[in-house]
Image (tube, rainbow, N blue to C red):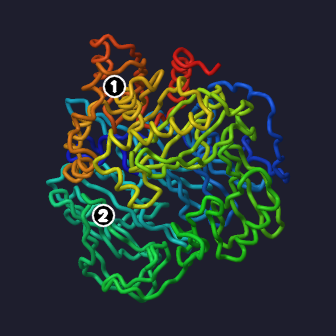
Amino acid sequence: MHVFGKFARSLSLAVCATALALFAGSQAPAQTQAEAPAPKAETSKPAKKKAAKKPAKKLPVEAFGQLDFFDKPRLSPSGDYIAAMMATNGIQQINILPLAANSPQKRVQLGVPEETRVRWLRWVNDDYVLAGVTSLITFGRGGNEAYVSRLISISRETGDVKRLMWNLKGQNAADVIWTPSDGSNEILMTGQGSIYSNEEEFWPTVYRVNVATGRNTRVKKGVKNVLDWGADENGNLRFGIVSRDRSGSQQVLYRSEGQNAFSTIQRTDMREFEFADLPFMFVPGTDNGLYIEDNEDGKGVIKEINLRTRENVAVRHELEDTDIVGVFRSYDDKSILGLRADDKDNPIRWLDENIAAAQKFLDEAVKGADPRIVAFNRDRTRMLVKLVTPRNPGLYYIYDAPYQQLSKLAAVNEAIGNKSLAKPKYVTYKARDGLEIEGVLTLPKGREAKNLPLVMMPHGGPWSYDSLRYHYWAQFLANRGYAVMQPNFRGSTGYGREFMTKGFGQMGLAMQDDVTDGITYLAEQGIIDSKRVCIVGASYGGYSAMWGVVKDPDLYRCSISIAGVSNVRKDVNDFGESLLSRTFSAQWKKMSNDFNAISPARFVEQIKAPMLLIHGKRDDRVDYKQSTRMEKRMREAGKDVEILILPEADHNFLRQDDRIALLSAMEKFLMKHNPPD
């Protein structure tokens, strides 16, 4: 996802692997606890909740701000174990659990140092789990910060931790490009050996690494300008991606199965938002791969294409009613088990008979939520199911297909449990130039949809979009009595390239008007009171929250900018520390030909509404000084402004204390300037 701010891979970082003190000594002990058994299975169907007829009871801010109790779950190949991040008292730990209540296997818990984030978990086989970890490191005299990534393997049986390739002295060494499907212990991964781009070791090298012993062999030495490598389903290195900042170009290097030499098969221009087109699966024994591409009617289908000639060999899968946007693959990555469809009502189409039968059973057994199969074991007899609804953080279940048994595993958020919160819905409206805009509207539960106070919440990116899913900010505000609108303004992704490119040249102009026009639409429908509107957003949304009260000073009662950009030119100039600085700058220059003319910090005299600025001091994407400088300018201009700088918060507010502080400040400010009653 594209974001406002600095790119993590910097040209020169004065940091090395030895500075990354993760899982060291007593700081993060691995434990096996017999006294902490796995969760017991409950063979009950989720009860259907009746709609409340009274205004919703206010839940404590901590209920919305707490970290997910059960996060990033991964089912083992056999289906006998599960790995997940589990949180207690605001602190997440890596857990490996047996799913059988009477299993002799002990539960493994691994503490995570405060400065460290676990980005993902992945099983290699039934015995070892990989974890990709990052830590924000301060380097140089200027106090710059950047994330350093590393890889660890964890023994399911003993809880022992093995650091993989931690001797490398580059920034990134946690990119796993292949794991085996035969139960063996060797993976393919890449890692940088230097932080300096003028040294050969800077460019990622491919290694074959044993996750049990840590032993490794070099498969492919790094190649200048190749930042990414990829392998086929059998662990053969097949392609590399060349990214050149000076020209803004990308090239795909490819080699046939069993060959040594790579050759260029594709060139694209990143400045034009063109990126390398890669197959998601190779056809064994050929130069063919499977791609999701448009057919002659512009509909997304799965094609078999020859990588060297770009010849369309065959259409392998297509849907009559909609586009294919993704796939589900088998455990060995060699067959397609299901399709992701561009269909809000029916987004998953299973091709595998066993999974399709399981989905049918789940659909009939579960009412009031969408039961989604999110993982399955090797033979597809045991499945991890998440009950999904935009009104609840979600519940996880285990489904045993042979017995048609659905057993509760955990709630994502224990404080909310299975409570049904406010019900979001899609709405569409016409922008002032006739363009159709879709948004997500969340109305407070138990209140009549008439003359409600509104919080307008444009998303970040701006190359992103909001969908019908659980959003803890929106639900928190709806619980406090506000209607919340999340508009997918022009320039958003998720609606095709044409809609995305309509944002070119329109940052601060039509993109902002699309937000304003959503307010007009809701007021015309009688849903909201147009005199009781505040605008809240983060990252690009934070910029929009500031710019909204500049461009339409009489429209809003208040503005809350979270990690927002007040000086667009300064933020774009920050790309100078990035390896692809010219490319990223060229992309942003497509959004506006005059950054000064759309920077809120230059127009504070036009602002009438009170503003709250919230920023994390450890934000490596948008410099927190974007907020402090905006505060200074507003104070000098005699404007009503408040600021909250959280010393340990990052761009995404991943710490529980920071999330609670953010929501508390937001509520206090809104109650002061736009009370819901």
Residue 652 visible in rendering: yes
Q: Amino acid at mark 1?
A: Ser
Residue 48 point in image, percent of width and height: 83, 46
Q: Nearer the viewer, residue 72 or 316?
A: 316
Please say if the residues under marks 1 and 2 sit with CB atoms less than 8 Å apart. Answer: no
Image quadrant where residue 17 sits: top left
Give how far apart the Cα atoms at labels 1 and 2 are.
33 Å
Q: Amino acid at mark 2?
A: Glu
In the figure, is residue 452 to the left or right of 666?
A: right
Badge 1 crowding class, 10 Å Cα cut-off, few under 14, some 14 to 19, many 20 or more, is many
Q: Nearer the viewer, residue 154 or 400?
A: 400
* SS at mark 1 in the image: helix
472 w.r.t. 319: above or below = above
Image quadrant where residue 537 sits: top left
Q: Nearer the viewer, residue 589 or 532?
A: 532
Q: Residue at x 72, y 41 (%)?
A: 36
Of label 1 and label 2, which has the lower sequence position? 2
Residue 45 point in image, percent of width and height: 84, 52
Q: Nearer the viewer, residue 291 or 379?
A: 291
Residue 71 point in image, percent of width and height: 60, 46
Task: Tell me, for residue 449, which label it has, or none.
Answer: none
Q: Which residue is mark 2?
A: 274
In the figure, is residue 308 to the left or right of 291?
A: left
403 w.r.t. 196: above or below = below
Residue 26 visible in rendering: no
In the figure, is residue 490 to the left or right of 586?
A: right
Badge 2 crowding class, 10 Å Cα cut-off, few under 14, some 14 to 19, many 20 or more, is few
* SS at mark 2 in the image: loop
Residue 237 point in image, percent of width and height: 36, 74
Q: Which residue is mark 1?
A: 627
